[in-house]
Image (cartoon, rainbow, N blue to C red):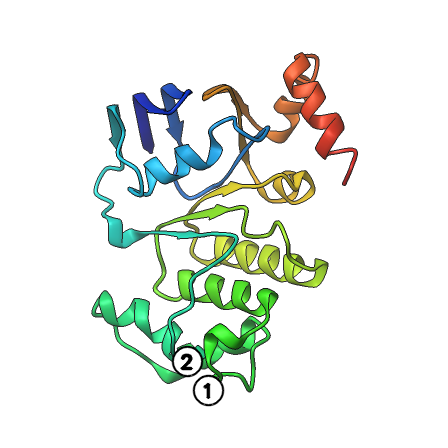
Amino acid sequence: MLKIIKLEKKIGDFQLNINDLCLEEKIIHGVIGNNGSGKSTLIKLMTGLLKPDTGIMDFGTLTKRDIVITVPRPYMLHDTVYNNLTYPLKIRKQAVKKETIMEWIDRCGLSGKEKQYAPSLSSGERQKLSLARALIFEPKVVFIDETMANMDPDSVVLFEQIISDIQLKNPVTWIIVSHQLTHIYKLCECIHFMDAGSILTSGTPEELLQNADNPVIRQYMSKYLIGN
């Protein structure tokens, strides 16, 4: 169980305040809410990209090497596609197996591009490489921060299939931030709705729909769910 207790962070006029949040391990969590609700700030705090003003984040025995994050505009190493995938293994002193590298290249639809200069890939291809690079070392917690926001439909389906396959074979903990409620509802077992820097409610997709009489949730649903 990943636990957050009395977490506070002030950035300008924005105040994040998470009193008590428990994230069950080895399931897929969704974090949703309007722009400015604090989703990305929470993710940055949980991944160590920001330091909290106060509060406790208890990840048990997990270390930073067990955690990975993907972002909408991933940074590509100025090297080949192949070497971008070997990097996370090398820094963790894990074995670099060519068959594993090539399997991920093929799985993400990048066959034949292993020697290509990674920054020259298209936007969609960079996203695919970013996902493969994040997962190749078998992390225990994966944060996906709006990674699928600008993807073509086929790439989104590919991402969803890879996530589902991992959960069937060797489940890990996922925290997915997205406005695309169709795949949030399709993938996530627990959804956390943020508003004004706090968690307004948490529950299964069905439980969240039952809270749709809340005006904030209702407005959000009508904007993003109906639009999809």
Q: Residue at x 70, y 19 (%)?
A: 218
Amino acid type for the residue under numbered disc 2: Tyr
Q: Is residue 108 rendered to the left or right of residue 6?
A: right
Tell me whether circle 2 and circle 1 mark residues in contact (CB < 8 Å): yes
Label 2 and label 1: CA atoms lie apart by 6 Å
Q: Secondary structure at mark 2?
A: helix
Residue 82 horizontal/vertical position (percent): 41, 80
Nearest the camera: 160 or 117?
Answer: 117
Q: Residue at x 51, y 43 (%)?
A: 176
Residue reaching furthest to the top: 214
Residue 104 makes an appearance in the image: no
Nearest the camera: 71 or 188?
Answer: 71
Q: Secondary structure at mark 1?
A: loop
Q: Which residue is mark 2?
A: 82
Circle 2 packing at 10 Å, graded few (<14), some (14-19), many (20+), is: many
Question: Which label number is shown at residue 115?
Answer: 1
Circle 1 packing at 10 Å, graded few (<14), some (14-19), many (20+), is: few
Q: Residue at x 54, y 46 (%)?
A: 146
